[in-house]
């Protein structure tokens, strides 16, 4: 290998929404970077629900958007604190970004080595095999995408 070629530490982007599969995705990513010497960007998105933005005639009053952002920040920090061992916290950087989850994750994963997302989140079709965000990311990401279904259940004894 040429002395002029260096590879930066691997970076894994993880989509967090508080669901069990997103928690499993975070745990997996942190375990992976402990082996590879990389870092994890734990991304949570937020947006003002469309129903609150307009009623068709005139915009509705919406509480400060900071309320939505603050709730997202609390969620991602709680998930990190609950799922990542204290010794590994320094490997994880949390980010709170306003926008549609699929696009935010794709933008965050630009230049990343891997994008890890849960198989389904809190959407209306939570029983689907793969949610709409996951589908979009799988088809449009410019890096490998790992879909985490959650921890395997223990088989009965």
Image: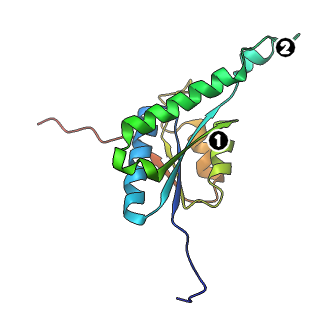
Query: Residue 88 appears at what percent x and percent y?
Result: 38, 50
Point out which mark residue 8 bears.
none
In terms of depth relative to the viewer, which is nearer, 84 or 157?
A: 84
Where residue 97 sits, quadrant-wise, is: top right
* Residue at mark 1: 102
Depth check, mark 2 against mark 1: the one in front is: 2
Query: Residue 65 appears at what percent x and percent y?
Result: 71, 23
Where residue 156 sits, quadrant-wise, is: top left
Kindly tell me whether residue 85 is visible in this rendering.
no
Where residue 154 sits, quadrant-wise, is: top left
- In this rendering, is residue 65 above or below 60? below
Q: Earlier in the sequence, mark 2 or mark 1?
A: 2
Q: Is residue 58 left or right of residue 108?
A: right
Q: Residues within 10 Å of mark 1 (few under 14, many from 20)?
A: many
* Residue at mark 2: 59
- At numbered mark 1, what does the secondary structure look like: helix, strand or loop? helix
Q: Residue furthest right?
A: 57
- At numbered mark 2, what does the secondary structure look like: helix, strand or loop? loop
How far apart marks 2 and 1 lie (CA) works out to 26 Å
Q: Is residue 83 left or right of residue 73?
A: left
- Quarter of the image that includes the C terminus: top left
Kindly tell me whether residue 11 is visible in this rendering.
yes
Q: Is residue 150 left or right of residue 118?
A: left
Query: Residue 108 appears at what percent x and percent y?
Result: 64, 50
Q: Residue at x 38, y 43 (%)?
A: 84
Q: Residues within 10 Å of mark 2 (few under 14, many from 20)?
A: few
Q: Residue at x 55, y 62 (%)?
A: 113
Query: Residue 63 appears at what percent x and percent y?
Result: 72, 14
């Amino acid at each position: 290998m040429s002395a002029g070629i260096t590879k930066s530490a691997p970076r894994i982007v993880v989509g967090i929404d508080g669901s069990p599969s997103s928690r499993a995705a975070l745990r997996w990513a942190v375990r992976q970077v402990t082996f590879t010497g990389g870092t994890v960007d734990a991304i949570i998105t937020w947006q003002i629900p469309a129903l609150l933005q307009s009623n068709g005639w005139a915009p509705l009053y919406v509480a400060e958007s900071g309320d939505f952002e603050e709730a997202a920040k609390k969620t991602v920090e709680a998930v990190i604190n609950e799922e990542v061992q204290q010794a590994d916290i320094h490997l994880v950087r949390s980010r709170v970004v306003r926008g549609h989850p699929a696009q935010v994750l794709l933008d965050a994963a630009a230049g990343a080595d891997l994008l890890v997302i849960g198989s389904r989140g809190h959407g209306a079709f939570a029983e689907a095999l793969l949610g709409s965000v996951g589908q979009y990311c799988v088809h449009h990401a410019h890096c490998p995408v790992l879909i985490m279904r959650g921890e395997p259940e223990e088989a009965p004894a």
